Image (cartoon, rainbow, N blue to C red):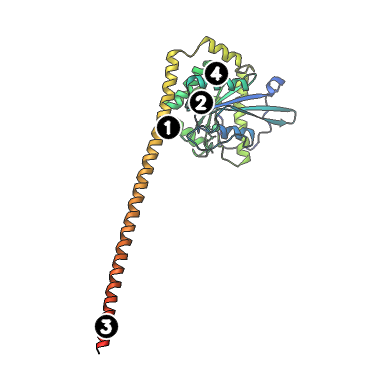
């Protein structure tokens, strides 16, 4: 498994594998739920802020986008194409829309993608939605896509580094996730997208590309391509039951977002009500104070009048 503290030897020796020309360029597609850290990971790979990355319930990346970076090593240059996708499983859209978006992603990859990075946040509890996200990918792309898949867990900083995260996985991860991690043994990486430590960044990239190279050699250099996608679509069109599962999943996600929204509205309303009550209480006490002051003023005036009339009589 990749990840963990830096071994300090940098990323300059990424080309440990022989680099025949067809392996020189690499295309990676990032998929996962909104907020899992896809764009932040893509930016880490690209070494800049090419993709907008921020905390949001809604997909910030609204459509697939591709950016490239060249990695130079003494003997070779490797172009890495990175395709960032919207949260395919959170979009308020139908299964057909998602398929269209995936087709677009495949078009962008031209000759296909070498690895699909399935991104999760290591910070969040692995839920049945995450499980369904993987199942949906299998439905949409076919099981063959698993041969090209790498699991990327972001928020490595929040979980306190690799050894603590591994322990957490062994101690408390749901069976589905543990099975996935066992199955993908050499293709699981932990990423801290927030680190400014260059050695750590290079180490993470090195681990990622070790997994990418593993996937490439496992597939004999054959990327997951458009043709395969088209064949898979023809061979296994999204069946009614599968479509139902998928639509059901989209409905669940919409319900979850709606619930979150409603609870936020309710919380804000309670807060507003409390604030109004507090303001009213302050206003009442001020009014009482003013009233009391007016009373004392009136009494003082009356006293003054009385004493001045006494003076005149005298
Ligand atoms: N602390 C921490 N925050 C992260 C990490 N990766 C992503 N984030 C934050 O998570 C939020 C969502 O990230 P983003 O890349 O936009 O997610 P996307 O919707 O999957 O593209 C942003 O506020 C990021 O700054 C990470 O490794 N560590
Ligand atoms: Mg994004």
Residue pointed to by mark 3: 307
Label 3 CB-ligand 1 distance < 8 A: no
In this rendering, the answer to whether 99 lies above or below 7 is: above
Mark toward the viewer: 1 or 3: 3
**x and y percentages locating residue 82 in the rendered image:** 62, 28
Single out the mark in the foreground, 2 or 4.
2
Q: What element carries label 2?
A: loop
State which quarter of the image contains the C terminus: bottom left
80 over 143 or under it: above or below: below
Q: Which of 103 and 24 is in front in this view?
A: 103
Circle 1/circle 3 CB separation < 8 Å: no
Mark 2 or mark 4, earlier in chain? 2
Q: Residue 37 location in percent, x, y? A: 53, 33
Residue at label 1? 257
Cα gap from disc 1 to disc 3, whole angstroms: 74 Å
- Binning the other alpha carbons within 10 Å of mark 3 as few (below 14), some (14 to 19) or many (20 upward) gives few
Q: On screen, 194 above or below 66?
A: below
Query: Picture quarter containing residue 152?
Result: top right
Q: Nearer the viewer, mark 3 or mark 2?
A: 3
């Amino acid at each position: 498994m990749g990840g963990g503290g830096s071994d300090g030897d940098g990323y300059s020796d990424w080309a440990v594998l022989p680099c025949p020309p067809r392996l020189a360029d690499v295309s990676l597609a990032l998929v996962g739920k909104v907020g899992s850290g896809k764009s932040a990971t893509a930016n880490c790979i690209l070494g800049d802020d090419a993709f907008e990355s921020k905390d949001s319930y809604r997909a910030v990346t609204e459509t697939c986008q591709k950016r490239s970076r060249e990695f130079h090593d003494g003997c070779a240059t490797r172009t890495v194409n990175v395709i960032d996708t919207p949260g395919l499983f959170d979009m308020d859209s139908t299964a057909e829309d998602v398929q269209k978006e995936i087709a677009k992603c495949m078009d962008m990859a031209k000759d296909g993608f070498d690895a699909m990075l399935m991104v999760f946040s290591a910070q969040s509890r692995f839920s049945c939605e995450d499980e369904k996200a993987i199942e949906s990918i299998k439905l949409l792309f076919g099981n063959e896509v698993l041969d090209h898949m790498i699991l990327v867990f972001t928020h490595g900083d929040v979980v306190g580094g690799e050894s603590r995260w591994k322990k957490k996985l062994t101690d408390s991860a749901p069976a589905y996730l543990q099975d996935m991690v066992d199955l993908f043994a050499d293709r699981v990486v932990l990423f801290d997208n927030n680190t400014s430590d260059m050695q750590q960044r290079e180490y993470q990239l090195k681990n990622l590309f070790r997994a990418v190279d593993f996937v490439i050699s496992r597939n004999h250099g054959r990327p997951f391509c458009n043709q395969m996608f088209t064949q898979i679509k023809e061979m296994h069109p999204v069946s009614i039951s599968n479509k139902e599962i998928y639509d059901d999943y989209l409905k669940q996600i919409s319900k979850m977002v709606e619930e979150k929204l409603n609870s936020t509205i309710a919380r804000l309303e309670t807060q507003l009500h409390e604030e109004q009550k507090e303001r009213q209480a302050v206003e009442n006490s001020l009014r009482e104070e003013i009233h009391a002051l007016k009373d004392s003023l009136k009494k003082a005036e009356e006293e003054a009048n009385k004493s001045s009339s006494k003076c005149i009589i005298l």
